[in-house]
Each structure stands twice: as structure tokens, then as C-alpha cells.
């Protein structure tokens, strides 16, 4: 008889009884403050993502292979959401808390030689949050091979076939999620495996293969090179319990515009809305051939729809009333999760969940990176769509919501600043060289070169600062409103757009960071500045709003009945 993941968690993982580890069962018997003892806290949007065909989260195929084969190529972000919820309702006796934290596998955040600087804090001292969500297609266990097929792939290093960047705004008012198709050809920077010292040289290859270059830290480095977005954390999930989780939350409503039957995943649904549970939920997340044109683009869209629907379910007060199931889910979820050291305890995951729950579903936007066929291999690979892809990444770098609902963050070009600038010769300006990227060395002497230009323009107190920096966009930052006019004067003199001027608590005076977008020349390259109407994801990103209950998947006509 096929075991559930909860049963496998108890029998395979073993370990001491939860009571012995500090689980407080009385919390369920008495219901805490008098509410429903099984009430699930409002955990907000997903804090993790998931696995792809085969589902092994360990880059070398270790314990990640256990009990995870049937969850091939599945976005199992629900593992993290529910794990966070479980911890919140459990009372988390100290010993049990420590036990669960010990289940987490940790890996280095970034394996590249160069790393982008973290996002600067805004005027209130808050910073945006960027988390890379990963899932693998490993078949590094017999069960994975039996359930996932492709026996000839047994033993090979896993690929990161699910990749999503989750961006939460500094003020926590909105969240944007960007998927990148697994077959997108990108620059994978030089990475060094922290376990055996293997050095993988820079190469051009599909983004899913970056996981084979030392682990998730190389995928993080690849994303920083691709997007210019500094990554704060990663989460890699490989979890067979998605079936039990879908049951635990009472199922997830999904929709298809026609009858669909996909023999590859086993999904069979009639036209309209269906609440999928158990194996059917798993089939939905795995389905590729049955949706749209049968590509990963359609599957990513279906996963976005499922994620949004799941978040709405959790926000609506989904209940988990069985303490035994909660314990098993907590065990299995934490054993299936690989994170960077910054998220290396369940307490940190819980804090993250509390942070994310502040984002309303109406301000969640799911997108796919705008893409086009790879001119070098149009039948097999994709590349970022010129213009549209960088626009999406630029909005994220500048902490602008992809839904277009943010207020315009810069004044009109012809508006007069409320803070008049001091005479140029009296404005202290610190100039830093941030031209280095993940894959490009910094341009030597760039800060001195731009400082000299500022001096020629009359900014006699401009001075180069040798502090190493690395960022995609050139910025002029200032710490308080009384220096705004000075910062705008510097930007205007160098030809920088006003959108490059920002207030931050991370500097003490007007500070110019020459970014990777300005590697040569004394004058900033002229670029058109987007108006407010352009500050949202292009249609090619196929944006989906978290509150859109009308979303429905198109069905591949070859897979209908």
C-alpha cells in the first residue's frame, strides 16, 4: 500500500517523539486564547518554491532523494508556508524548535567571485527583500527513478528546473514574483564548489544547469548577473508531502477553459473550476503538455495560479486541526528544505513569514520573464526579450511594484525642487566605483574619472572613495530632505535621470555610485526615462494579480477530451 508523506516522515526519518522534544500538546486541547485550537495563523504569501521532476533538493543527491520522487518538477512552496504556520501554532517548545532547526540543510548563499551590494535602506531605514526560490529535478534515489522515470539520469547532478525571484518591497506593501524558464540561455559566472573546491569557469548555458556548478549559490550568482538584483536569501525545496498539504488546507481551487487530460502528469479535469486535492493537486503542478502550447511557459502560469489561490486559502483562515499531521508536516517540511545560513533556523523562517503576511493579496503580482527564441538555438532555448526583460528587472532593482499601482517616486522633470541646491562649490560629494558585476571586473579608476568631471563642472568638494561597490544602476543618494536639492544638482550636471536620485539612511552625504550601466565616458549615457504609466510589468511578462479569482488556464487542444 502506498504510504503518505506523513507516514514516510515518521517511519523513515525517525527521531524522538515530539513530546520528548518539547511539543506542547495542551495548546491543541485548550485552544490558546479561546479560539479554534486548530486555527492556522495568517502566514501570508509563499516564502519558498519548489521542486521539479524528481525533486531532490541536495545538489549532490544526498538525503534530498528520500521520499520525493513523485513530486517531480513541482512548485512545492506550500511546504514553507505551512512549516511556518505549524511552528506558530505548535508553541514550539525549545527542544522541539532546536530539533526542527537541525533538520534544515544549509548551503552558501553566493558562490561567485563578485557579488552585488545589498539594497540600500529607504528613508525609513527599511530595505526590500529578494529571495530566490528553487527546485531541482534530481533522480539520485531509487524511489525518484521509479516514480520519476528517466533511469538513465540516475546519479547525475540535479538541475534547477524551477526558479523564481520573490521581491518584497521595502515598505512591505507589495510583492512581485518573476519566473525564468528553465531553458533560458544565460551567462553562468565562475563558481567554486565549497565542498570539494572544484572551480567551474564562466560559461554560456541554460539557467537550470547553474545548480550543477557547485550548488544553489551558483544559481544565485547567475541570477545576480542576469537581473542586477542583489539576492538576500535562497530556498530550495524538495518535498513529497505536497499531496498531504493540499489535503490539509482543504484543497486549492483551479480552473481550466476546456476539458484537459495529460497522460504525462495524470491530470484529468473537466472544464471550469475544480478544487484539487492530494494527487490531483500534484498533477496540476506537474502538468506541462496539457496547458497552452505544452511548454514550461504554460506550466509556470499554472503554478502562479495555484500559488495565488493557495495564498487566498490561507488568508481566508484555512484550518489544520490534527496535531499529529502538523508534527509530521513540520518534520518533513524542514527536512526537505535547503536554505542559506541567513535563514538557517525555524525562528528566522517564522520571522520571514510574519514579514510576508503583511503584503495584501491584491498587491501580489506573478510574472514570467519576457523571453524570445534563442537566435543560436531557436528550437531548444530562450533568451531574455530585449527591452521588456530588462524593464522588469529594472523595476525590481528600483523597488517599483510590477502592478503599476505605486505612486510615482520621482518628481516631474520640469518641477522645481522644494529644496534649492547649495552653490556647486559648497556641495560635498562622495564618488564610488560600482562598475563591477558578477561577471565583469570593475573599471579601474572610474570613481576618480567621474570625480574629475564633477570638479570640472564646479563641484570642488567632490572626492573619490575607494570603498568597493557593485550595483547595476548608477545612483545619487542623500540622507535627508535638506540635501535633496544638492543631490538633484549633481544628477542634473552629469545627465542622470531624476529616478537615479534617492533618499537613503545608508549614506552620510550626497553619494554618487557609478554603476555597471556607466562604464565609460564623462557624461551619463542618455536614456529615455519612463513615465508613471510605464512603471508596471509589460504585457509580455503575462502578469497575474493575487486577487484574480477569474484566472483560468488555456488547454492544449491536443490534450483535451
Image (cartoon, rainbow, N blue to C red):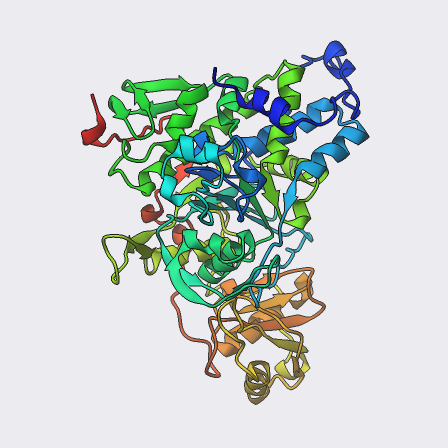
Residue 158 visible to an observer of this rendering = yes
Q: Is residue 474 above or below residue 356?
A: below
Q: Position of residue 414 (x, y in %)?
A: 46, 65
**Most foreground residue, 62 or 295:** 62
Residue 182: x and y in percent read 38, 48
Q: Residue at x 63, y 22 (%)?
A: 10
Above or below for 167 versus 426: above
Measured along the vertical axis of the image, is residue 414 above or below residue 237?
Answer: below
Q: Nearer the viewer, residue 151 or 382?
A: 151
Q: Is residue 528 left or right of residue 21?
A: left
| Residue at the spot 36% in from the left edge and 47% down from the top edge | 541
Q: Could one spot residue 252 in this view of the protein?
A: no
Relative to 554, is 513 on the left or the right? Answer: right
Numbered-mark total = 0
- Residue 391 or 305: which is nearer the viewer? 305
Corner quadrant of residue 21? top right
Task: Give the side of residue 352 with respect to residue 242, left or right.
Answer: right
In the picture, the quarter occupied by the C terminus is top left
Residue 518 screen position, x and y as percent: 47, 75
Where 492 sits versus 271, above or below? below
Image quadrant assignment for residue 375: bottom left
Residue found 76% across the figure and 29% down from its top:
96
Coordinates of residue 55 in the picture (x, y in percent)? 47, 38
Amino acid at each position: 500500500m502506498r504510504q503518505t508523506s506523513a507516514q514516510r516522515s515518521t517511519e523513515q526519518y525517525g527521531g524522538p517523539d515530539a513530546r520528548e522534544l518539547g511539543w506542547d500538546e495542551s495548546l491543541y486541547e485548550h485552544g490558546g486564547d479561546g479560539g479554534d485550537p486548530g486555527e492556522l495563523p495568517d502566514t501570508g504569501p509563499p516564502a519558498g518554491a519548489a521542486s521539479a521532476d524528481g525533486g531532490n533538493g541536495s545538489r549532490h543527491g544526498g538525503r534530498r532523494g528520500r521520499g520525493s520522487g513523485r513530486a517531480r518538477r513541482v512548485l512545492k512552496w506550500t511546504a514553507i508556508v505551512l512549516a511556518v504556520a505549524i511552528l506558530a501554532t505548535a508553541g514550539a517548545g525549545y527542544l522541539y524548535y532546536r530539533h526542527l532547526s537541525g533538520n534544515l540543510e544549509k548551503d552558501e548563499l553566493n558562490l561567485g567571485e563578485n557579488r552585488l551590494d545589498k539594497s540600500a535602506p529607504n528613508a525609513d531605514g527599511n530595505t526590500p527583500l529578494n529571495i530566490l526560490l528553487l527546485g531541482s529535478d534530481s533522480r539520485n534515489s531509487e524511489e525518484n527513478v521509479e516514480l520519476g522515470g528517466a533511469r538513465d539520469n540516475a546519479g547525475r547532478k540535479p538541475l534547477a528546473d524551477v526558479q523564481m525571484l520573490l521581491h518584497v518591497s521595502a515598505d512591505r506593501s507589495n510583492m512581485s514574483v518573476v519566473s525564468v524558464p528553465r531553458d533560458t540561455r544565460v551567462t553562468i559566472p565562475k563558481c567554486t564548489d565549497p565542498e570539494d573546491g572544484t572551480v567551474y569557469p564562466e560559461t554560456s548555458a541554460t539557467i537550470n544547469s547553474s545548480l550543477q556548478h557547485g550548488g544553489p549559490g551558483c544559481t544565485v550568482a547567475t541570477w545576480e548577473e542576469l537581473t542586477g538584483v542583489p539576492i538576500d536569501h535562497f530556498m530550495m525545496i524538495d518535498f513529497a508531502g505536497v499531496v498531504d498539504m493540499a489535503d490539509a488546507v482543504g484543497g486549492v481551487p483551479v480552473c481550466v477553459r476546456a476539458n484537459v487530460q495529460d497522460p504525462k502528469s495524470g491530470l484529468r479535469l473537466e472544464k471550469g473550476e475544480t478544487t484539487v486535492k492530494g494527487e490531483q493537486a500534484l498533477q496540476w503542478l506537474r502538468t506541462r503538455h496539457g496547458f497552452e502550447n505544452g511548454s514550461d511557459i504554460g506550466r509556470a502560469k499554472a503554478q502562479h495560479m495555484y500559488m495565488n489561490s493557495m495564498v487566498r486559502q490561507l488568508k481566508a483562515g484555512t484550518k489544520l486541526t490534527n496535531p499529529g499531521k502538523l508534527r509530521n508536516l513540520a518534520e518533513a517540511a524542514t527536512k526537505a528544505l535547503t536554505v542559506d545560513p541567513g535563514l538557517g533556523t525555524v525562528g528566522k523562517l517564522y520571522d520571514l513569514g510574519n514579514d510576508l503576511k503583511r503584503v495584501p493579496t491584491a498587491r501580489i503580482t506573478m510574472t514570467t520573464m519576457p523571453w524570445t527564441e534563442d537566435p543560436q538555438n531557436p528550437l531548444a532555448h530562450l533568451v531574455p526579450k530585449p527591452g521588456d526583460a530588462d524593464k522588469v528587472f529594472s523595476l525590481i532593482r528600483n523597488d517599483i511594484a510590477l502592478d503599476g499601482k505605486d505612486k510615482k517616486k520621482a518628481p516631474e522633470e520640469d518641477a522645481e525642487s522644494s529644496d534649492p541646491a547649495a552653490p556647486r562649490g559648497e556641495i560635498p560629494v562622495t564618488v564610488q566605483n560600482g562598475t563591477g558585476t558578477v561577471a565583469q571586473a570593475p573599471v579601474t579608476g572610474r570613481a576618480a574619472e567621474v570625480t574629475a568631471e564633477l570638479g570640472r563642472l564646479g563641484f570642488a568638494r567632490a572626492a573619490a572613495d575607494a570603498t568597493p561597490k557593485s550595483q547595476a544602476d548608477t545612483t545619487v543618494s542623500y540622507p535627508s530632505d535638506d540635501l535633496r536639492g544638492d543631490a538633484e544638482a549633481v544628477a542634473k550636471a552629469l545627465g542622470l535621470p531624476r529616478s537615479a536620485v534617492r533618499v537613503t539612511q545608508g549614506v552620510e552625504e550626497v553619494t554618487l555610485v557609478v554603476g555597471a550601466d556607466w562604464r565609460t565616458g564623462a557624461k551619463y549615457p542618455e536614456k529615455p526615462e519612463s513615465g508613471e504609466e510605464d512603471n508596471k510589468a509589460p504585457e509580455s511578462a503575462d502578469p497575474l494579480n493575487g486577487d484574480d479569482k477569474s484566472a483560468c488556464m488555456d488547454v492544449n487542444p491536443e490534450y483535451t477530451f
